[in-house]
Every structure is written in structure tokens, then in C-alpha cells.
């Protein structure tokens, strides 16, 4: 049984790394209409998000993307990971997935009229044992960068994943 458990853990680690490698960096388009709608939905009428002239007068090179919008960028990438990994992941490997935290570090304001990309990196799964059994902690580091690879923000999403056969 221990040998089959070791194989399961190895296959689990290999599979999640394959998917992250497959989707490593994705270009994202953020258009004016999307930001306008976002600001409307969160009831944020700050002119630096809605008016180029005001943003420039304030000292920026154009309209900014609201910091709250950042989560919608990184969450898309994480959701896509779990879609790509597919049902076979849950049938063969995981019996439970818990999103335990999201920690964002902002480095610079994001301008609306720039090209951005999301890059995903993955920590080595770490085995954790507690009252509820054994889980593997995995951190997805989702970074938003521009075309020059300048990092604007990083969102670290931690998940606990319970493997089949763990109690």
C-alpha cells in the first residue's frame, strides 16, 4: 500500500506541474468597457479609472486599472487551471480541494492602455497532517506583468488538496 501511495503522490505532483507548465504565461486583454463596467458594479467613480485627462493631471500616464480588478485577472487563471486539470484529476487524485488563502502584493499601478500577461508558478506541494487528516499545501503564484516583464502585482493562492486514500 505504501508503494501505491508513493506513486499516487508522485503522479499528483507531476500532473499539477504539467498543467501549470502548459498554461504558464497568458496574455490578457483589459479593455475600457470592462473597466467602466467593473467601476459601475463596485460603485467606484474615481476619475483616475474613468478619465484619461484626470489620470494624466494626477501624474499618471493614463487611466488606471482599479486594484480590486486585479483579483478578477488572477482568479481567471486559477479557475482555468482547475478546468484544464479536468475531472480525471478528481477521479484519480484529489478527494478535496480547499482554497485557504490569497495574499496580494502590489508593486505598481496598472495603466489601462498597456498589454499585460499572467504568469503562473507553483510551489512544491508540502505534506501537512492535522486533525482532519493529510493534505498537500500548494501555492499558485500568479504574477501580472507587462510586455517588458515588469511585475505589477503578485497573488499567491494557497490550496490544501486532499489526496485519494488519505484520512
Image: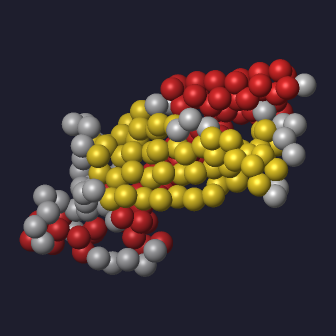
Asked whether residue 35 is in view, the answer is no
From this viewpoint, which residue is outermost toward the right?
A: 1
Indicate how the structure is coloured in the image: secondary structure
What residue do we see at 47% from left, 59% from top? 103
Q: Quadrant of residue 117?
A: top left
The N terminus is located in which quarter? top right
Is residue 146 shown above or below 15? below
Q: Quadrant of residue 28?
A: top left
What residue do we see at 65% from left, 29% from top? 13
**Residue 26 falls left or right of residue 96:** left
Q: Quadrant of residue 37?
A: bottom left
- The one of 153 and 68 positioned closer to us in this rendering: 153
Mark count = 0
**Residue 42 falls left or right of residue 106:** right
What residue do we see at 46% from left, 74% from top? 42
- The one of 94 and 112 positioned closer to us in this rendering: 94
What residue do we see at 52% from left, 58% from top? 102
User: Could you say where residue 58 lies in the image, as x and y percent from the top left?
Assistant: 12, 72
Is residue 88 shown above or below 63? above
**Residue 47 falls left or right of residue 25:** left
- The one of 142 and 72 positioned closer to us in this rendering: 142
User: Could you say where residue 21 lies in the image, as x and y percent from the top left?
Assistant: 51, 26
User: Could you say where residue 19 lies in the image, as x and y percent from the top left?
Assistant: 58, 28
User: Could you say where residue 143 lies in the image, as x and y percent from the top left?
Assistant: 39, 45
Amino acid at each position: 500500500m505504501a508503494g501505491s501511495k508513493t506513486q499516487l503522490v508522485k503522479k499528483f505532483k507531476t500532473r499539477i506541474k504539467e498543467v501549470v507548465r502548459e498554461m504558464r504565461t497568458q496574455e490578457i486583454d483589459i479593455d475600457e468597457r470592462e473597466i467602466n463596467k467593473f467601476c459601475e458594479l463596485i460603485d467606484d467613480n474615481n476619475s483616475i479609472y474613468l478619465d484619461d485627462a484626470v489620470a494624466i493631471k494626477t501624474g499618471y500616464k493614463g487611466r488606471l486599472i482599479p486594484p480590486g480588478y486585479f483579483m478578477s485577472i488572477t482568479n481567471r487563471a486559477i479557475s482555468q487551471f482547475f478546468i484544464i486539470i479536468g475531472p480525471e484529476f478528481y477521479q484519480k487524485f484529489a478527494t478535496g480541494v480547499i482554497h485557504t488563502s490569497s495574499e496580494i502584493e502590489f508593486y505598481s499601478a496598472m495603466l489601462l492602455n498597456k498589454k499585460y500577461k499572467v504568469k503562473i508558478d507553483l510551489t512544491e506541494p508540502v505534506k501537512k497532517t492535522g486533525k482532519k487528516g493529510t493534505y498537500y499545501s500548494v501555492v499558485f503564484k500568479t504574477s501580472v506583468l507587462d510586455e517588458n516583464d515588469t511585475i505589477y502585482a503578485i497573488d499567491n493562492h494557497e490550496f490544501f488538496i486532499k489526496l485519494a486514500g488519505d484520512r
